[in-house]
Image (cartoon, coloured by chain):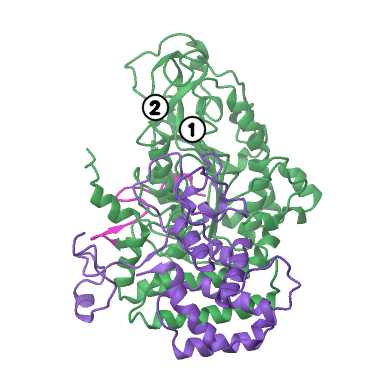
Amino acid sequence: MRKPITRRDALCRIGTGFGMTAFAGLASSVARASASTRGVLDKLHFKPKAKRVIFLLMNGGVSQVDTFDPKPKLAEYDGKPMPGEPIKTERKTGVLLRSPFTFKKYGESGIEVSELFPHVGECVDDICVIRSMVTDIPNHEPSLLMLNTGHTQLGRPSMGSWLTYGLGFENENLPGFVVLCPDQPTVIGPPLWSNAFLPAIHQGTFITDRVPKKEKSFDPGKLIPYLESEDATGLEQRRELDLLEKLNRMHMERQMEEDSQLDRAIQSMETAFRMQTEAPEVFDIRKETEAVQKLYGPGSTARGCLMAVRLIESGVRMVQVYYAKGDPWDAHFDIYEHRRNAQDSDQPFAAVIKDLKSRGLFDDTLVVCATEFGRTPVMETGGGMAGGRVVNGRDHNPFGFSIWLAGAGIQGGMTYGATDDFGFKAVENPVHVHDLQATILYLLGIDHEKLTYRYSGRDFRLTDVHGNVIHDILA
Amino acid sequence: MTSTYQLGLDYSAKNFEMDPANRLYWRVNRRRLDAESIRDSILFVSGALDPTLGGASLDLQDTKNVRRTVYSRVSRFRLHEYLQTFDFPNPNITAETRFTTNVPLQSLFFMNSEFVKSNAERLVYRLFEREPLKDEEVEATWLDEASTGEKIREAYPLLYGREASHEEIEAGSEFLAKGEGLKVWTQYARVLLSANEFRFIN
């Protein structure tokens, strides 16, 4: 039974203002080192397979029985109540609903993937599908927080923050952790890529990759707000920045003790200056050949995926690509909505794998394609916004869902774990989100139990006090 | 107001040794101004701020909007990039407290935004007690007449609530000497607005 969080606790843990003071108080050299772009781990715990991560997040809850977890029994029992004890999820559910999508075997491994993801299906020999994922709470906010920060409540550092904290920045002119989405993903937003109590430098940089309807063509300079200077040349800006830094350092000296907030603000000016030249270059997907652009296809997810590959190629440690704002995969009422989302995502996701290979990055880049929870094999009835009019959808399901991994250190062409006959609960080799996180860290050379940060009286880590590495899926 | 709430940021070696994280609140924590206060402060020191209370909200995109930021429209659908950049919370949910981030995008705002540039220019006009003119072709000969040091000394109390130090006047004068006219003064004013001291308060 989880102890309720008091308001005081929440305040202490959430505002990075409080957290920063705690950091400033630590006089250890470890703390000081982590305020720079060097990672806090001098030596990795394991030999790393991956150097960087592309995390494709299909936010909203993807239905496994309609995508990566075929259930023939579901078709057999279509329209009938599910045998056994009813399992309570977020909303009211009714009888079993068969998948309207057909599954097909792909590749040499013969893994079955639904018609929603044919391109990904073609790459199935490079992919490991985990069909027995489990999470704790059947709702978006806590589950997204769990997936990103290892805890169902606000106030913990995100995966990307832990990674840059531990491993450091490969390219100092770019942010170490980038989050791409056409708008603000879901109702949470910043806490999903927040550094929480880790030093401010480890916060994810959120960039919307939406092209406004007014713009005829795509302009990378417009992606990051305020990226271009109207009046000052590079040299003139440099002069301004030099004076600014001088004044800021004088100000810091007067404070008598180190303040990492101020220090970080000074550093971020420098990064911003360099970003002006480097970032548009990296974000400019128009620089890619037509062949590459065609590989990804059209649309915002495609742009995001291509950008992600370019970013990690330039040294960004982790890039997360959300599908869209809100909970786009959240098909409570009509499972056919999955088709539209899949149309936007399928080709780009496969392109990421293919493109990484052709750039020679596949073997040391980890690709994760996940969702925060799955969907029920039973249909959703009543309640919700549609008032029960449309009954062709599925409710949230934290008890069993599918994700896939590819790339560095991952054994391709395999499935791991299984759900019951109807695809509701994980029954074979359940994998909790913490286990996934432990495995991701392991592939990057980090022992998830050892990358910790002392805050508020105890050592925190991404996996909290849980998590086991799943060695069976590693090559 | 409690006595704790009224505490300042003064450093005490003894207290720092006992409680470096300031968990027992022997002083206030330095904090960054929130999005509204930053924009309001910039408008205030440049003299542009319209202090009218009440009335209909305005759009932040509108360059003629010089009212306090609390009077700006907040879109739940697409939060204005200025607000987003400075940690305005997601308007779709309640926010118990705001996150305070410290990222290059904020620096870019100070370096490159039209808002900061135009207010920096206004600040120059204010320091020299001139009415801002629309026409950029103006020679601004009055700039050469004034004493640089004197104007820097006037700027500091206005922006930071304190006297400028000797080093600061020197650094500023050196910067201004290497440039020309309204342009270099605007750049200098922009530096003053971008300084940590302007947005991190005690």
How would you rate the neighbour count of disc 2 (Cα within 10 Å): few for under 14, some for 14-19, many for 20 or more? Answer: many
Q: Residue at 45% of width from left, 67% of height from top?
A: B199
Q: CA distance from mark 2 to mark 1?
A: 15 Å
Q: Residue A344: percent from the left, percent from the top?
A: 65, 35
Q: Give the camera-side residue of A337 and B64.
A: B64
Query: From the viewer's perspective, is residue A223 above or below residue A122?
Result: below
Is the stretch drawn in magenta largely helix, strand or loop?
Answer: loop
Point out the stretch of residues depicted in magenta. A455-475
Can residue A276 be seen by looking at this rendering? yes
**Chain identifier, colour purple:** B
- Give the mark nearest the N terminus, 2 or 1: 1
The residue that mark 2 highlights is A425
Q: Colour of chain A?
A: green
The residue that mark 1 highlights is A61
Q: Give the camera-side residue of A114 and B13.
A: B13
SS at mark 2 in the image: loop
Q: Quadrant of residue B120?
A: bottom right
Q: Residue at 50% of width from left, 68% of height from top?
A: B45
Q: Are marks 2 and 1 in contact (CB under 8 Å)?
A: no
Examine the structure image and report whether residue B80 is included in the region drawn in magenta: no
The quadrant in which the N terminus of chain A is found is top left
